[in-house]
Image: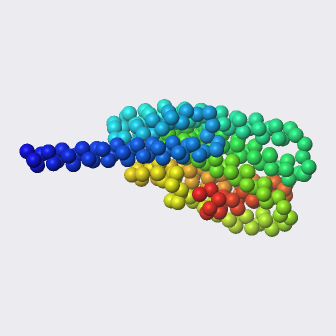
Amino acid sequence: MKRKNKKKKISETKINSTKKSKKNQSNDFLEYLKKRPYFVGFSVILIIIVFALLLTPRQEFEETTLSLIYGKALHEHHLNEIEYHLTQVEKKLNGTYQTTLEDDYYYSFKEDILWLKQREEELCKNTKNLLIKQLAFNTAFEGVLIVNENVGYEYFIEDYEGTINSALNEKYFDQNFENNLEVMNMFIGEKEKLNIFLTEYNSIMRDYFDYKVFIIKNSNSLERQFIEANKLFILSDPLALS
């Protein structure tokens, strides 16, 4: 009898430990989303609940269904955010500029957002692991916006051609977010889900890098090439988007 009770106690301890772990992961996920500066107008609490459910062992069908439902909701949110940023950039394009460089900057920004829109629509076609992939897209979306914000600080450089040639020798840096506790805490004990997240994120950002290289090689505008070159430097910096 005593032996049986001991086993029961151990089992209860494991269950309580698992519940605590899931609760901590939900809290970490909430903190991660709260800090996303571009994650606006979406029900964070709803996503928290869903993510907690996804981390709880259950039938594959149920997990796939939840991932599909809330992944599509996040997809719609991203499309709304994309339209918002397009509207803001269009306002800038309809304004007046002091330099050609500023004009090229906003055209580049607009094309980046349109590129993201196309990528988001493609992503939603494959519904497997949709929620995790949408979270990866959300992080990549933020990354592209950060790149466009930071590139403006390089306007003081005068050696356009040297900057462009140097940038074409750069390589995209694959992120693993190992020092980013916000990301890592979302996937504690969920290595497979973390790998899906990282694979999708780096796939998006690597394609974005290649897109910038393509623009440089095919643009006739030295100013536009210079803008894209500075984006390559940011994307190849290990710390810029970590």
Taking the spot 76% from the left edge, 35% from the top edge, the residue there is 87
- Most foreground residue, 185 or 13: 13
Please identify the residue farthest to the left as the structure is shown.
Answer: 1
Taking the spot 91% from the left edge, 49% from the top edge, the residue there is 98
* Residue 109 image position (x, y, % from top left): 75, 46
Q: Can residue 192 be seen in this view?
A: no
- Most foreground residue, 157 or 181: 181
- Most foreground residue, 181 or 236: 181
Q: Is residue 19 left or right of residue 230?
A: left
Q: Is residue 154 left or right of residue 241?
A: right
* Residue 242 image position (x, y, % from top left): 59, 57
The total number of labels drawn is 0
Taking the spot 38% from the left edge, 47% from the top edge, the residue there is 21
Residue 127 vs 107, above or below: the answer is above
Residue 19 vs 159, above or below: the answer is above
The N terminus appears in which quarter of the rendering? top left
Taking the spot 80% from the left edge, 46% from the top edge, the residue there is 106
Q: Can residue 46 be seen in this view?
A: yes
* Residue 227 image position (x, y, % from top left): 78, 55
- Most foreground residue, 177 or 181: 181
